[in-house]
Image (spheres, helix red, strand yellow):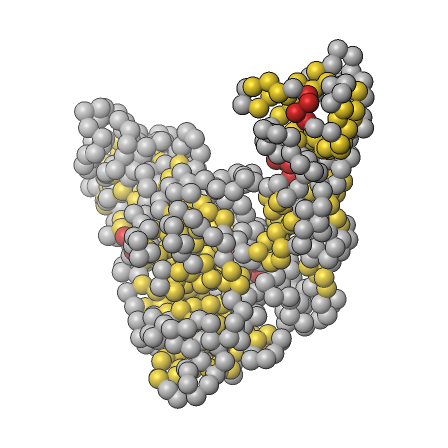
Amino acid sequence: MTLQKLQLRPGINKESTTLANEGTWFEMDKVRFRSGYPEKIGGWTLDTGTANATLAPPAGSFWGTCRSLFNWITLSSYNLLGVGTNLKFYIQNSTGGTFYDVTPLRVTTAAGDVTFAATNGSTTLTVTDAAHGAQAGDFVTYSGALALSTQTYTADAATDKITFTTALANGTTLQLFTTGTAPAGLAIATTYFVVNSDTPTASCKLSLTSGGVAIDITGVGTGTQTFALTTGITATVLNKEYQVVAVTSNNVYTITSTVAATALDTGNGGSATVGAYQITTGSATSTTSVGWGAGGWGGITTGYTSTGWGSPAPAGVGFGAQLRLWSQANYGQDLIFNPRGGGLYLWAVNANPNIFDRGTLLTTGDTPDFCNFVMVSDNSRFVLGFGVNDYGSGTQNPLLVRWSDQEDYTQWTPAITNQAGSFTLSEGSQIITAMQTRQEILVWTDSALYSMQYLGPPYVWGFQILASNLSIVGPNATSTANNISYWMGVDKFYMYSGRVETLYCPLRQYIYGDINLSQAFQFFSGTNEGYNEVWWFYCSSGSTDIDRYVIYNHLEKIWSYGTLERTAWLDSPLRASPMATGYNGQLIYHESGVDDGTTNPPIAIESYCQSADINIGDGHNYGFGYRMIPDVTFNGSTVNNPAVTLTLRPRQNPGSNYSTSATPTVTSTQNYQSTRNYEVQQFTQIVYVRVRGRQMAFRISSSGLGVQWQLGVPSIDIRADGRR
């Protein structure tokens, strides 16, 4: 028989059986279609930036699970990236730059409100702060605290001795904290002293040094002074950022020190300790809710603050243990951002571009206390709040849209002299999200899609319903490409190109038959414009974390899918590659290299693509395949000997298991050491195989480092081989 081309239709189709889908592709992972042919997707590399905080994240570059990325450039041409996680909010300055913690503060206590208690040998510190309002996982920064090992002494210049309240061993190092006047020539909290006594007793001599010059004991002066040991829980240990471990009551919680306490750590940190509490953290996953804005029947609990059923959460808190989502938009060179269910915050560029101040809560001009999504309009620059509380009300209305005055985010109260205003949508129970497009702003509720357009005074913004009886899985499930908007619903995909349409998806049954919709607010979408793609990431039914993706090539109108753990995605023209984030606090650049660069050293990306069953003849007779001519290119490979595995998988009937060919594996035998970027159409001239069956599936796969491939049109020679 003559050679027959394995010419398969581009794209994947899993809407029927493997035999019914003959002529197309049926299974895949880490593979896309480009110009109609399958190829391995690009690799990814890690951003090298690190956090600037004293409390380093346990893994990666930042604390928490990122759910929001936003990229913009300042007037000074600084390339900034806003990173919102369930624990913090960061701004990165340029690719590979530092991640600056700009998480807003919720409250700062008065001096002396915070006291510490330690246990000998333990790293657990008990903190007392009346009505602290914190919950486990929150962050607090202390300042003004003294070491817990303060030792009071009385100096006697006549005898050149001092008397400590506790006997100190010879060689003990101390640091001065004076309650009166510092000794001449000595700086408080910066000069160190060593006890010098042949027989450690309560009465000891001191060896005093300042700048390397010995100081006589008479320089200490007389009266009561205070020293602190430089071991155990020192002031340096206390005066930094901590994460709350557990909350015991409204007044008490615990933190974990970086060093263990000693028996002498009996102090409480002094009377000047200040605690600066960051806004309450959120959850990395969704929890089941009952009622609007509530947790269980008893409402929500944040730390030791509870609300009744259906009541909103406190400002700046979000919804307690609810999944923490952020929305953000640049207002000129500054950034306005919002934790879903919380207030509106402003991060302003400092006059010194190397200083990154914390975000601040917007409170003037009747700014909404609660907001589910924030946006800054391109048209006339209004700040738009979706799902907010009304003027003068402390109750959140999930269908209310409010906007500030034009060019003024501090004025939200409507007046005849400004353009601030509001509008309540009529369909659905809550606004899920909004997205700015070329001529309008699209607003999704949980059952309808609205168009929002600027009209000018007196109505300012007009609303028109585009479609009802539709769905959207979550706030981040939308993307726009080529002026067409795409989004993922709870049971199918949609597109809007001037009218709302169902987007045909040959993977619909596969996706929605194995999906965890209880985590739908985690799902997100993003574009990869270099390949004309829209990506969606979602959780499979057995997972509470994102573990799968599906790709729609909007130019070629074909689909592909696979497995990948990511938490956010942004394809920004301001940076070289599409960005994503991982579960270990990592910023990842996709389409960068050909391997998985999230580890050091990188590891190979395993990819494969398998066809649906191909009938040998009409399936009446058995067929015997004995030779194959592959057609693969390795453009972009970074190794000298790139190779793929080609497999023919025959079977007797559609219900039987696949068997294997006698020679199922095909690899390159050529040596390409002279060049790494090359065109190879036939890396092996001919492959002799032995396969027998009524149907067969064709598979291409790779698992080697540095390998990049694209399949062309392989050929196979099959002859009839009887009916049994």
Depth order, front residue of 320/415: 415
Residue 284, compared with residue 665, is above or below; it is below
Direction from residue 618 to residue 361 in the image, left or right: right
x 33%, y 38%: residue: 594
x, y (%) of residue 535?
39, 56
Image coords of residue 358 (percent x, y): 50, 54
Q: Quadrant of residue 541?
A: bottom right
x and y percent of residue 251 in the render?
Answer: 76, 53
Position of residue 27 in the picture relative to residue 339 (left or right): left
> Front-most of 177 and 563?
177
Identify the image quadrant of the C terminus.
top left
Q: Quadrant of the N terminus?
A: top left
* Rendered residue at 63%/44% (across/down): 144
| Closer to us: 291 or 718 | 291
Q: Residue at x 61, y 29 (%)?
A: 184
- Count of residue discs: 0
The answer to which image quadrant residue 104 occupies is: bottom right
657 relative to 513, above or below: above
Residue at the front extreme of this rendering: 158
Q: Nearer the viewer, residue 381 or 466?
A: 381
Q: Is residue 658 visible?
A: no
To which quarter of the image does residue 632 belong?
Answer: top left
Residue 267 percent across, percent down from the top left: 76, 37
Q: Is residue 141 visible?
A: yes
Q: Residue at x 39, y 88 (%)?
A: 458
Asked if 502 appears above or below 611 in the picture, the reply is below
Relative side of 256 to 52, left or right: right
